[in-house]
Image (cartoon, coloured by chain):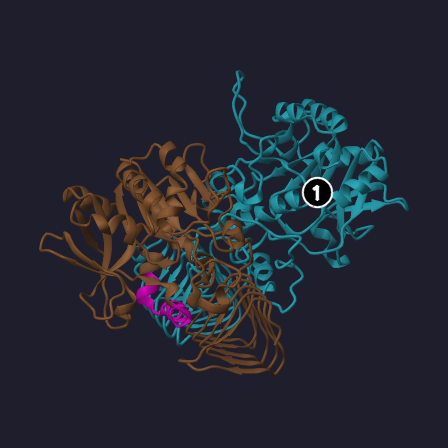
Chain colours: A cyan, B brown
Amino acid sequence: MQSSIVAMVLAGGQGTRLGVLTDDIAKPAVPFGGKYRIIDFALSNCVNSGIYKVGVLTQYKPHKLNAHIGIGRPWDLDRKGGGVTVLQPYTYESGKAWFKGTADALYENLDYLDKTNPKYVLVLSGDHIYGMDYMDMLTFHISKHAKASCACMNVPLNETYRFGIMVTDISKRIVEFQEKPQHAKSTLASLGIYIFNWDYLREALIQDAKDESSSHDFGKDIIPKMVEDKDDLYAFEYEGYWRDVGTIYSYWESNLELIQSIPQLNLYNDSWRFYTRTEEMPPAFFGKESVCTNSLVSEGCEIHGVLNKSILFQGVQVGKGSIIKDSIILTGVKIGDGVEISNAVIAENSEIGSGTRIGVGDFAENEENPGVYNSQISVIGYNTNIPENAIIGKNCVIHSDVNQDSTDNWHVQSGRCIR
Amino acid sequence: MKVLGLIFAGGRGENLGLLTTKRASAALPVAGKYRMIDFTMSNMVASDIRRVGVLTQYSPRSLIDHLGSGKEWDLDRKHGGLALLQPYMAINNKYWYRGTGDAIHQNMTFLRRSDEDYVLMASGDHIYSFNYSDMFNYHFSKGADVTFLYKELDDTYNLSEYGQIETDEDGRVIQFVEKPSENVSNKAFLGIYFLNKHLLMDLLYNTIPQSEGYDILLDVLIPNLNKLRFYAYKFDGYWRNTKKGVDEYFKINMDLLNDEIRKQLFYTGNTVHTKLKDLPSPKCTGTAHVENSIVSDGCIISGRVINSIVSRGVQIKAGAVVENSIIMQDTVIEEGAHVKYSIFDKECNIRTEKRLIGRKDDLLVFEKGSVI
């Protein structure tokens, strides 16, 4: 059964609402949970489900993602037959280039799919955090004699406006689709995980490509058209952990959920391991003056300060007397002595000078992009260099590659941005 | 110039007692996530050695499982790569490896067929970070036939447990004494040799078949000390041999809590590769207290951990206290247990409220799978 299905992972999105975190990398490459990147969850789910033919569709700033996936070795996807194939946009005689939407991305790779010649195609997003056995969904799909199935999850009624909502009949057949509705008729939200019969999908993609009014998107065009045409589309109900870490706040919150004593996302399950590619580093070291509670501390870390409710990725150094709470510190960040950080996300390879305080003062609306930066959380971009004794307020943004010469005033008020 | 690596990993390390009942000393877990052999393997690949033979004999299962195809060291190769050389039976051979020299002699085909012209021989149970290229350059600049690696030992070592060499002003070895009752020099030979492969093969062909002894050093090389040019290259970094005993093994692990030593072994030198386990980052819960300790992936710490080395997948529950101890993979220390100066092998279970207090000079050692 597994060899008759190919997974297509959509990994080309920018994830604009993650702000500076996706300045240089696509959303699926954003680090998560101490040592992973977001796409690790979709890829691990594939191999744990026994799916070893995986196409990864990239577009937005793919370098980190390409390097991360490589030939797929960490996921056992370096295979003679199948394995992982990174599918990037390409040009042909008429000069056409970028993927116009998720459906177009698959349409442009019809050759790849024809050559693989699957019976079923699993379409996934590389942006989501969850552990799901796709074989359960395929079994459901086959048992319903469906042309397509869509994984759905019940969400609270007051959150239905954020999702595509599926209305089903008693046999789980989808009879109506509401995109981000004000008045939802159901609480079944689409998770953006689809299984199609390949012969059906192939035809639908060709028709969609011809349709000039279409935005060539699965959620906006292909699925609504199926519902409209009353094709056999079924809702597979998934119960379990699933997160779209689409915003800075949800990114921060989902990371911190991992420090609960029994987190909903089980990273410790021997039979459902999440794989990733990481630097090889020695285990974490805790110094004589370290105090560490409710935190994850990854390999290569050297901790001499105080941590509470924080996630530290690989190779983070925390100096003496520093206090870090409610924060996400990504790989290779060096924090000096006597630093105080609260409610912050600090991106890779940044250096925070001694005596600096981050996350102080009162909340203020962000001056640059209040749509993206709208919580207490301050975000420090990649490869920044914050000088000693700086003060950075709440809801601030320090863009990537900022150094001490980028501004004269390192008393950054809440809501301010430094470029 | 291409160099073939040979690693001696067949010994038990009798002084290690319970820790090596079911594994060779080269497979002994160390520093939280590593096994002893990782250091020599990683040093070799960092020195551009692309073909490595590992000589195994005593209880090799865990070692073989650990090394696998050699892919963690980039040694899963079409050309070269990792070769596990185990004792075998043949029509003209009915012996186990009778010594290190015999072990190589029995694998002469491996030497003959490899296209490397030089051989680096090293032990699989030493911990150090070194790029052997410096030693190769020294060998050629001195026009040596055989080059030894040595270290001047300070008084934290028991000198009489080591083979000692004396050199002339040029660095040429003029005397070698194995573990003398009276020390002749503080220059300890580290069991690491570099020489021409064809010379090694000649020496083995000429000695092993007629010999009473089968040791590469004492029976094959040293008898030629005056005939050939033996030189010694000095190693200045951190180096320890775990075979010396349980106390030495404990000291090695505790040494890793020292910033300088940790830096030298892991951050300034070669990357140390090991088998990956794909475990999540360790978690400290609300009741955790971790002080001067190393904690590996997959651990969940709710108790107090002080001056200890904690391997992968260990659970230390609330109210448990772990002091000055080594906790190997997947061991569970239950609520309220108190352990001190103890070494727990893999998969031990220390039950609630149990007290296991050793002393620095009288360590408690618990076998794999102990339930206490």
At 66% from the left edge and 41% from the top edge, which residue is drawn?
A: A124
Q: Is residue B54 visible?
A: yes
User: In this picture, which residue range is highlighted in magenta?
Assistant: B245-263
Q: Quadrant of the N terminus of chain A?
A: top right
Q: Nearer the viewer, residue A341 or B322?
A: B322
The residue most toward the left is B169
Give coordinates of residue B320: x percent, y percent.
56, 79
**Residue B254 painted magenta:** yes
Q: Nearer the viewer, residue A235 or B142?
A: B142
Give coordinates of residue A375: x percent, y percent.
55, 62
A210 vs B230, left or right, is right
Q: Is residue A31 above or below residue A100?
A: below
Across the whole image, how many numbered discs are drawn on residues? Answer: 1
Check disc 1 and give the amino acid type.
Answer: Ile
Give coordinates of residue A163: x percent, y percent.
71, 49
Q: Which residue is mark 1?
A: A193
Question: Residue A79 appears in which quarter of the rendering?
Answer: top right
